[in-house]
Image (tube, helix red, strand yellow):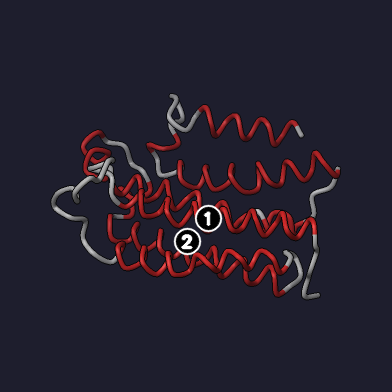
Amino acid sequence: VAAFALLGLFISVFYVAPPVKLKHHGLGEPGVLVVWGPLMIGGTFYVTTGVLPPWVIVASLPYAFLVTTVLMAKHVDKFEADSTKGIHTLPVIMGRDRALFLTQELMVAYFVLVLCLVLTGTLGVWTLLTFLAVPRLWKVLRVFNKPKPAQAPPNYPIWPLWYVAWAMSVNRLAGGLFVLGLLLNAIIPIHLT
């Protein structure tokens, strides 16, 4: 239990704090993935049950992927500012186009991993409700394949941030449906195997 807490504290504190500054060395995004997946979900499972089977770590990854897409998109939006300040986020290290592609891959990987976890019986069938967010995913993937607009669309409240809002729209819908599926599975469990 202490290891989960200490690692989570380390990543949280040293995300931007000296001397480590994980965000400044392209380690902020992987750190967030670890915190929002294996540490929070795996740690909660371990504290609750006293065991941590490997399937729990794998099952913790889908939502961690979604959260990481939001951070990746935010750092793409802040690409110029971070580059100028010498903050080497993962998008700055990778380049804008490759970072946008990786963000799209993580969004798609979320759905693929959920499907695989259902097909193997690790997650219940109800978590497939998250696939109701696929139309939103396709819309967002199309946005990510186009250049950012030169100016804010009318009534757009968070300009100059662009990609992060779109990534968050997938996160909110797919993540909410995923949690609903988990709750339904707790009430009416249905597994394929």
- Which residue bears the numbered disc 2? 106
Please rate how many residues cluster around mark 1, counting C-alpha atoms within 10 Å: few if below 14, some from 14 to 19, many from 20.
Answer: many
In the image, what residue type sits under mark 2? Leu
At x 46%, y 46%, the residue is 29
In the image, taking residue 113 as reference, residue 102 lies left or right, namely left
Please rate how many residues cluster around mark 2, counting C-alpha atoms within 10 Å: few if below 14, some from 14 to 19, many from 20.
Answer: many
* Figure check: 88 above or below 105: above
**Quadrant location of the N terminus in the rendered image:** top right
At x 71%, y 34%, the residue is 3
In the image, what residue type sits under mark 1? Phe
Q: What label does residue 144 carry, if any?
A: none
Q: How many marks?
A: 2
Q: Position of residue 87 (x, y in %)?
A: 31, 37
At x 74%, y 41%, the residue is 44
Q: Position of residue 152 (x, y in %)?
A: 18, 48
Indicate the secondary structure of the residue bearing disc 1. Answer: helix
Specify the quadrant of the image occupied by residue 46: top right
At x 67%, y 60%, the residue is 181
What is the CA distance from the residue labelled 2 to the residue labelled 1? 6 Å
- Which residue bears the numbered disc 1? 65
